[in-house]
Image (tube, rainbow, N blue to C red):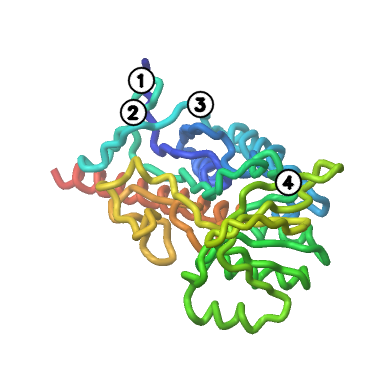
Amino acid sequence: MATHTTKMLIIGSGPAGYSAAIYAARAMLEPIVVQGLQPGGQLTITTDVENYPGFRDVVQGPWLMEEMRSQAEHVGTRMIWDTIVSVDLESGSPFRALGDSGDEYIADCLVICTGAQAKWLGAPGEMALGGKGVSACATCDGFFYRGKRVAVIGGGNTAVEEALYLTNHSDNVTLIHRRDSLRAEKILQERLFANPKITVLWNKGVGSFEAGENGMLHHLALTDTVTGEASTLEVDGAFVAIGHAPATELFKGKLPMDESGYLLTEPGTPKTAIPGVFAAGDVTDHVYRQAVTAAGMGCMAALDGERYLAARAHAVQEAEAAE
């Protein structure tokens, strides 16, 4: 067990965490990144990435995260493979955190980049066909299904928005919902029902995701939730849109959250309710959830953290001068 002291502790290592680290390190803050259970975040389980600026050709998600990590280390970030299990925010700065390893982390400011995970159905074939026809992000992957048959599974705002978005790429979009009415906002439902490219299958549950001879998704095995009748739907792509779960369990009762568990920040900034504590990326963003927006928020968190530390140091100097 060891004690690690830093000016800026970054919890999480996706695009937000790595970007915050790059900016913090270049500001000579000697940041520490505690990488968590999945170093690199969700992009490490993503194959083709075509919408991150700066790359003309498709790049692989794991490679992109490795490059970000290497860049952060190159400019002076210290990476630690550990998972934070508790934090003390009540005492103010310096903040204390405890790792699963037993190591203690003491930091003058804290940047939370723990991200969010898509919720999955848990049906057979779902994970095996990830990146092979099954996705949880139409904005990320819809482009790859231009002119193909796609399905969206869910009944809330996210599902309806994803179905509408996919009509930009496909004339054959099916929304599958296990009930006979949607939970989405009425205005979204009106747009959905008015779109001739979208068909809704009511009272249908997805029992499994089935591959074809080429190893890619071929069809969905469906079950009628009322009658129990089995059926199939041939699709090239299926998007699971039943929500996301932000990784904020660690901060419950310590930081304000919305009803879904996302950390609340001052509008337009990464500042939480506690001075010196910042949040960036999917842990606070349930709207965009993109690598590029997470990276931008990580940059903002590092810059605001630098300003916070400078103001704090200046206040100490003034206090000492007045004595």
Element at label 2: strand
Q: Residues within 10 Å of mark 2 (few under 14, many from 20)?
A: some
Which numbered disc, 4 or 1, marks the residue that appears first in the sequence? 1
Q: Residue at x 61, y 36 (%)?
A: 69
Is 183 situated left or right of 205 in this image? left
Q: Tell me the kind of residue under disc 1.
A: Gly
Numbered badge on residue 81 = 3
Which numbered disc, 2 or 4, marks the residue that appears first in the sequence? 2
Q: Residues within 10 Å of mark 1 (few under 14, many from 20)?
A: some
Numbered badge on residue 102 = 1
Q: What percent of the width, then of the height, locates residue 17?
A: 52, 43
Q: Tell me the kind of residue under disc 2.
A: Leu
Numbered badge on residue 210 = 4
- Classify residue 26 by image quadrant: top right
Looking at the image, which is closer to me, 297 or 197?
Answer: 197
Marks 4/1: CA distance?
44 Å
Residue furthest top as drawn = 1
Q: Tell me the kind of residue under disc 3.
A: Trp
Q: Residues within 10 Å of mark 4 (few under 14, many from 20)?
A: many
Question: In the picture, which quadrant includes the N terminus?
Answer: top left
Element at label 4: strand
